[in-house]
Image (cartoon, rainbow, N blue to C red):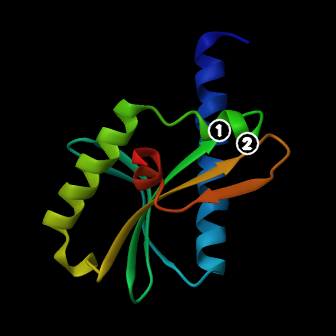
């Protein structure tokens, strides 16, 4: 497969994984506020909320859940934090008492794992 085709295939897989992640969040009672939200710092995959929590979600899909779990780089973490700060500053109507950044992982078999408050866990 040529490089542009590989890029398109990866984009489609990512979009499908983000759609599945959104469905999982909705099943837990969250309302999706945005998908692929562009910020000055970069893109936030999903933004969702319930009454108490604003949730920013990074979605990763790899061959295995272990590979997906290690796919979040320090640079991406910084982008997500900066994007979340921008979001909170520009969308006060979306703020909630709690804000959290989660990671939702998918493997190629379609299994999912959610790591809540992922950046705080990476610091510990």
Binning the other alpha carbons within 10 Å of mark 2 as few (below 14), some (14 to 19) or many (20 upward) gives many
Hey, which residue is sitting farthest bottom in the picture? 51
Q: Specify whether 109 is left or right of 59.
A: right
Q: In this rendering, would 52 be left or right of 118?
A: left
CB-based contact (under 8 Å), mark 2 and mark 1: yes
Residue 105 vs 5, above or below: the answer is below
- Quadrant of the image containing the N terminus: top right
Image location of residue 56, percent across then percent down: 41, 61
State the residue lying farthest toward the right. Answer: 109
Q: Is residue 87 above or below residue 5?
A: below
The residue located at (40%, 89%) in the rendering is 51
Which numbered marker is on residue 68? 1
Which residue appears farthest toward the left when viewing the image? 89
Q: Residue 28 versus residue 119: which sits nearer the camera?
A: 119
Residue 16 position within the rendered picture, expressed as x and y whole percent measured from the top left? 66, 50
Image quadrant of residue 107?
top right
How crowded pointer 1 is (Cα within 10 Å; few <14, some 14-19, many 20+) is rated as some
Residue on which the image places disc 2 = 65
Q: Residue furthest front?
A: 124
Q: What is the distance, in whole Å, between disc 2 and disc 1 at their CAs?
A: 5 Å
Residue that appears at 58% across and 35% down: 11
């Amino acid at each position: 497969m040529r490089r542009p085709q590989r890029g398109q295939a990866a984009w489609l897989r990512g979009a499908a994984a983000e759609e599945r992640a959104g469905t999982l969040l909705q099943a837990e009672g969250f309302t999706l506020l945005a998908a692929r939200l562009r910020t000055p710092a970069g893109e936030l995959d999903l933004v969702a909320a319930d009454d108490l929590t604003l949730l920013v979600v990074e979605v990763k899909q790899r061959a295995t859940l272990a590979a997906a779990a290690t796919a979040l780089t320090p640079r991406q973490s910084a982008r997500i934090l900066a994007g979340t700060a921008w979001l909170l500053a520009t969308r006060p109507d979306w703020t909630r008492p709690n804000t959290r950044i989660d990671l939702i992982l998918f493997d190629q078999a379609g299994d999912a794992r959610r790591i809540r408050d992922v950046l705080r866990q990476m610091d510990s």
